[in-house]
Amino acid sequence: MSFYMYLHIITIRPTRFVPANYEVRLCVFIIGTAFKDAFDFLNGNWLKIVGMVILCYFIKLLAGTLPVQGTLQIQFSPVAVFNSETFRSLLIASFVNSVIFFVMIDYITNTQRTMKKRFVRACTYPFRYWKLLYKGLVIFVLSNLLIYTIGMMVVYAAIGSLFLLGTAMNVGSILISFAYFLLFSIFVWLFLSISQVSYILYDDPDTGIFTSIKKSFSLMKGSRWVLLGFFVLTGVGMVLGTLLIFVGLIFCLVLYEVMRLTFYRELLKRRRREKWQATADSIK
């Protein structure tokens, strides 16, 4: 029995009994399937997709929008992002990165289908479906604001922990720390919950912003820890890739972009299986 066949078997949720380690095995299944599907995407198309990913990141680098794809520059003022200059930069960077995102995803998708003129079609995709221009802008601004907040809270937590180390813990400091951690968890939860909105909009550009956010929340139900683990693994891979003199970094970037797409598709398959199972159970 192959490894992936085994992973498929362990994800069939029993109707009456759910093993204690079911969620762990589900995480292994989703990441493992996304990893396998990513290599299926790349099989025979490595140079094309690598070239496209490098081109997209190079454009971001030239445009000065590269840090905004996943984060904003961390500043010590919590309201720094709301000054006019910073917010204007955020809007421009979010717009550029949203356009590049749809171009890159369309190219990767069409490469698997071996469509002719896929580069031209990919470059014009967000303009042919012009609603993606403002919808992508809204989603990327929202995502970047959440990441900015999360990044700032990490910085403040690190600084605050240094002060706490030199003082005795009391009930007040414990409660403040707990409330801070709870607020931090809420922001992370929100960011993970809307992480699939861009892919949903790519699949159906006519979907409304709030509808796509609702669908993303539904898709991410029970899979937030999986995506968080994927982000952590990607971060570790990029650090190691940088140490391996750039080649490993490019590999990690390409694999990250393709796996984000295959991860989204695996969530769709899982949701369809759950709906089918619920329908089958209601008929019995």
Image: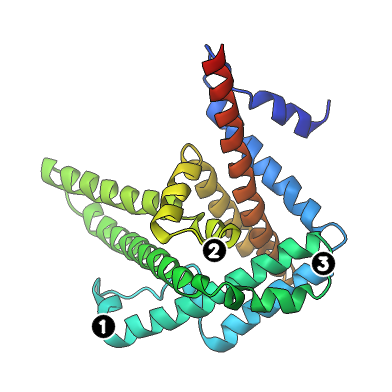
**Residue 87 vs residue 106, the one in the foreground:** 106
Circle 1 is placed at which residue position? 83
SS label for mark 3: loop
Three-letter code for the amino acid on which mark 2 is drawn: Pro
Which residue is most to the right? 44
Q: Nearer the viewer, mark 1 or mark 3?
A: 3
Most foreground residue, 88 or 219: 219
- In terms of sequence position, does the residue under pointer 2 or pointer 3 come before the other? 3
Residue type, numbered disc 1:
Asn
In the rendered structure, which disc, 1 or 2, sits on the residue that comes first in sequence? 1
Question: Is residue 169 in view?
Answer: no
Q: Quadrant of the N terminus?
A: top right
* Left or right relative to 176: residue 186: right
Q: Label 2 neighbourhood size at 10 Å, few (<14), some (14-19), many (20+)?
A: many
Mark 3 lies on residue = 115
Q: Which residue sits at x=70%, y=42%? A: 33
Q: How far across and how far down the image is residue 170, in percent? A: 13, 43
Residue 91 in picture, x, y percent from top left: 40, 79
Q: CA distance from mark 1 to mark 3?
A: 45 Å
Give the x, y percent position of residue 129.
57, 72
Q: Which residue shows up at 64% across the image and 56% down it?
A: 261
Q: Which residue is mark 2?
A: 205
Question: For the residue carrying disc 3, how many other residues have a C-alpha within 10 Å: few (<14), some (14-19), or many (20+)?
Answer: few
Name the residue nearer the viewer: 283 or 157: 283
Q: For label 1, count other residues whose C-alpha is less than 10 Å away and answer few (under 14), some (14-19) or many (20+).
A: few
